[in-house]
Every structure is written in C-alpha cells, then in structure tokens.
Image (spheres, rainbow, N blue to C red):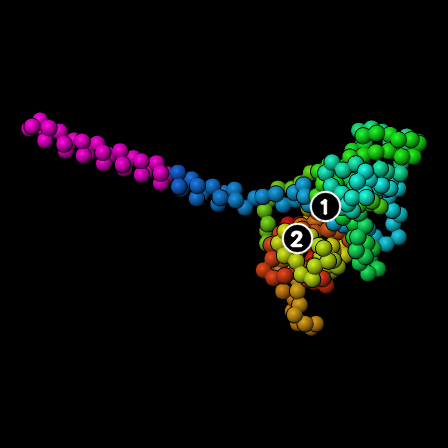
Amino acid sequence: MKKGRGFRPYLQVFVIAIVLAATAVAASGQEAEINKPKIFGEYYQLISDSDLYCSIFLYEEGKPFPDIRIIGAERMNEKVMLDDYDTIYIDKGQADGIDVGQIFLVVGLREKVGEYGQIMHRRSRAKIVRIDGEHMATARLERSCGDARVGDYLVPWEDMEGEIGKDEGYCDLNPELGEHGRVIYLENDFRIAGSGQWAIISLGRQHCIQIGDRVTVFHRAKTGLPREAVSSAIVIDVRGGSSTVKILSARDAVEVGDQVQIIPLR
C-alpha cells in the first residue's frame, strides 16, 4: 500500500507532461494553419480555364465571320441547346482540309452592342469524328460550358495558359497615366456586375492592351463630380478595339458606362 501511494505523484507528473506536450503540438499545428494563408492565401488563379474557354468577347463590326458553321445536329428535332456528347454536322469536309481528330472551339453570336459589334460566346469543344463528303463532316461536342446551337461557328482550337497571382485591389490613379476607356457590356447583358463576372471594355490591341493587364474601374455619381475607384479587373481576352475583363474584387457594382483605366506597369 505504501509503495502504491508513493508512486501516485510520479504518475500525476507523467500525465501532466503528456498533456502539456500534446497541447504544444496542437498549438504548433494551429499556428501553422493560421500562418499558411498569410503566406500563400493572397495568390490564386486569376485567369482560369473557364475565363479562357467559356467567356465572352466582342466580335467587332465589319469583321468577316468564321467560315465553318454548324448546319445540323443528330438530335436537333428534340432540343435546341446542344451540350456534351451531342453529335453535330458542319459545312466543311475533305475538300476544305478537315481531318478526323481535329479540335475546334464552338462560338456563338448573341447580343448586339450598339455600333461596336456582337457578343460572341465560347461554348464548347468539338472533335471531328467522321468525314461525310467533300463539304460535310461530323463532330462530337465535349467540355461544354454553355448551350451550343445549330448556326454557331467553329474556329481552330488554341491551348491557352491561365495566370496565378494576387488581386492588387483598386485605388485612385493618376488620370494622366494609363489608357482610359469605358465598360460597354456586362456578362449576359446584366445591368450591374460584381466579382467573378465578365465585362467588355472599349480598349484593345490598338491601345497596346495585353492579356494579364490590370484595370481599375471608376464610377461617377453624377457628371462633374469626382470619380471613385470601385473595382479591380484583369484582361482575359483582347480584340482590335475591345477587351474582355474579369472583375476580381469590387466594393460597389460595376455598370455599363463606368470609366476604366489600365494600371501602368510598376
């Protein structure tokens, strides 16, 4: 009995030591979990596959349309909106250089934007599976991100790379620095847009704009009042006189007519 009572204090000390050690390990793990976002959390996929292959762009007025078109589909009598695994027929074949295995991007003309042109939607990949004649071939849709339709166009597929980085936010800029333009269209013709959505701006290659350029969006409550920075965006597609941007962050809604300014390289 005396030996048992004498051993009890050592046992208590041993248990306390184990508890303290476990607490230290847990605290260390929690600290690592807390610290990790501070180091890496600012960086993310600024330009994703969805931005590259599912987004919108402006098909500018006067530009000739692509010369490959969907003229029919296996299930066109059952549904209008075509998606993955649907079989389509195009108006080009062997005499036009079409080969089995070729990959195309399906794009569709949609809304008209004033005198600028028409909105073009990227909708799906199409893989040629059969040649049906001199001027006809069969393709199958894959990796769809929208509703392809009979009448849509096919353009050559191009592999593109996204961009990982961090949102540098929005702030006042010197109006004398960087190109100025306007928001001329919002995704799906919305009245307002926010983070993660796409917009078309009136700046393009002729203004030396490139994919990856950062943009600040400004809003004026009324003509004659100062402008206020409301959003940051990144260029994901460039045309002659227009570009598509992805809104990264916003403290207020982006509207058609808002001013945009390219952030000068630091």
Residue 11 in percent (x, y) is at 18, 31
Alpha-carbon distance for marks 2 and 1?
A: 15 Å
Residue 205 in percent (x, y) is at 79, 49
Residue 178 in percent (x, y) is at 71, 56
Quadrant of the rendering where the N terminus is positioned: top left
- As helix, strand or loop, the secondary structure at mark 1 comes to loop
Q: Quadrant of residue 19?
A: top left
Q: Residues within 10 Å of mark 2 (few under 14, many from 20)?
A: some
Amino acid on which disc 2 is placed: Gln
Residue 157 in percent (x, y) is at 78, 37
Which secondary structure type mostly characterizes the magenta part of the structure? helix
Residue at 47% in and 41% down: 36
User: Which residue is tagged 1?
Assistant: 146
Query: Which of the marked residues, 2 or 1, is nearer the chain's N terminus?
Result: 1
- As helix, strand or loop, the secondary structure at mark 2 comes to loop
Amino acid on which disc 1 is placed: Gly
Range covered by the magenta-colored residues: 1-28
Q: Is residue 101 in view from this perspective?
A: yes
Residue at 68% in and 45% down: 51
In the picture provided, is 26 more to the left or to the right than 132?
left
Q: In the displayed structure, would residue 175 be above or below residue 265?
A: below
User: Which residue is tagged 2?
Assistant: 197
8 in magenta: yes
Of badges 2 and 1, the one in the foreground is 1
Q: Quadrant of residue 101?
A: top right
Residue at 76% in and 48% down: 121
